[in-house]
Image: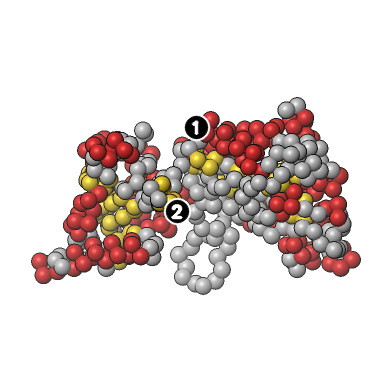
Amino acid sequence: MNNKIYQKRRNTLARQIHAKSGGGIAVISTAPELARNRDSEFPYRHDSDFFYLTGFEEPGATLVMEVNCSGKDYKLQSHLFCRPKDTEREIWDGIRLGPDAAPAVLGVEFAYSNQELDHKLGELLADQDAVYIRLAESAEADRRLRHWMKKVRGQARAGINPPSEFHDVEALIHEMRLFKDAHEVETMRRAAAISARAHIRAMQACKPGLREYQLEAELLHEFRNSGAQSVAYNSIVAGGANSCILHYRAGSTELRSGELCLIDAGCELDGYASDITRTFPVNGKFTGPQRALYDITLAAQEVAVAMTKPGNTFMQPHEAALKVLTQGLLDEKLLKLSELGSLENAIETGAYRRFYMHRTSHWLGMDVHDVGSYREQSNSSSKEEKPWRILKNGMVITIEPGLYVRPADDIDEAFWNIGIRIEDDAVINDSGCELISRGAPVKADEIEAIMKNA
Ligand code: ZN
Ligand code: MG
């Protein structure tokens, strides 16, 4: 394992702690294991922030960063608390790294058994002013912090001062995670390529009479067969009317000729998500109304892609997509120009929301809805609304316009139950953006061709 990237990230975090507070202690624990039902656990998934700083995937671990002022500079020492070696447990559950091996493998200065966490924290927090921790995370985390603080306060008569400054460590880490380094972008490219192949596999397997879960099985096959550890989120495979339910899960609905199938699915590879949506006709050929709305959605995505570049705000791709979608709804008479008067009014009044009720983009990274503020960060404490985030090199966003037409008396029946979304993953670079998910075809003709030749 290349532990240098994690050391570099810890140093970046330490530098900020030094700048804000002179020095301090940062505490970041990984995620707990979760029981599914009797004696059976959910597949374990590490905490993203913890993994970002350590590259360590085992449960039961905590990273403590000790940042001490040293002249004008700072000195960082990283302490890892992890599960101790245990022959009996390792026979049942698998090999543990253990504290003896951890410093060499993870590049931390010190490692201990996690059973020493409470005791050691009492020492590490002594005479430190600032603590960087997840605030108000859980009752359990609050209880532990109280326990550590009690230990330090108990030493007051020995002349030891407890910390008096508490900061949210997430805010600092999440700002870092918003900008992906070369290693992260490369991992995300590989994740998106696997997911793109999975979408092709599902399109090619699709035929009337199959059920949604059978296409989900095709996706999962490609994910795991390509080495992805997991899905990045529960796969949406939605046939017919289900395509208009935004967070539908793959169910047992039969896929019928003449209807659309919407698949929103992506794998997680080495801790990074991909997030792709494709919509295709179950029988391999779009109907006229389906094709009309599909082409509008694709045109909306194209203008949004063109607006996804450094210097534009996070909202500009959405605004561009919204215009094309709304104009399309007017052209197809799903929105009535006679009632709305103008395109501008159809947007301003939110009339389009009946057919397009979500945003066009979200950050993508370790988490599918990744962390990072959507507003510009400024030091002003004014309550005024901060401007939307300016897109910059290294950010990764999805671009996913859609149109969803549910049955209604005032809607031409030919459009009923058409739900379309087209979603790609974009890495912002100097010249605009790189679409890393385009291994899956997106043009209607290309989709039809790929299904025909299956
Ligand atoms: Zn998405
Ligand atoms: Mg998605």
Q: What residue do we see at 66% from left, 54% from top?
A: 246
Residue 191 in the image: state x and y as whole percent. Answer: 54, 37
Looking at the rendered structure, the kind of residue marked 2 is His
Residue 137 in the image: state x and y as whole percent. Answer: 39, 62
Q: What residue is pinned by disc 2?
A: 174
Q: What residue is pinned by disc 1?
A: 227
Between 37 and 246, the one lying in front of the other is: 37
Looking at the rendered structure, the kind of residue marked 1 is Gly
From what the image shows, is residue 345 above or below residue 314? Answer: below
Q: Quick one: which residue is furthest to the top in this view?
A: 453
Q: Secondary structure at mark 2?
A: helix
From what the image shows, is residue 158 above or below residue 226? Answer: below
Between 260 and 158, the one lying in front of the other is: 260
Which mark is on residue 15?
A: none
Residue 336 seen from this side: yes
Mark 1 CB in 8 Å range of ligand 2?
A: no
Q: Quick one: which residue is furthest to the bottom in this view?
A: 383
Q: Secondary structure at mark 1?
A: loop
Q: What residue do we see at 11% from left, 70% from top?
A: 157
From what the image shows, is residue 273 above or below residue 325? Answer: above
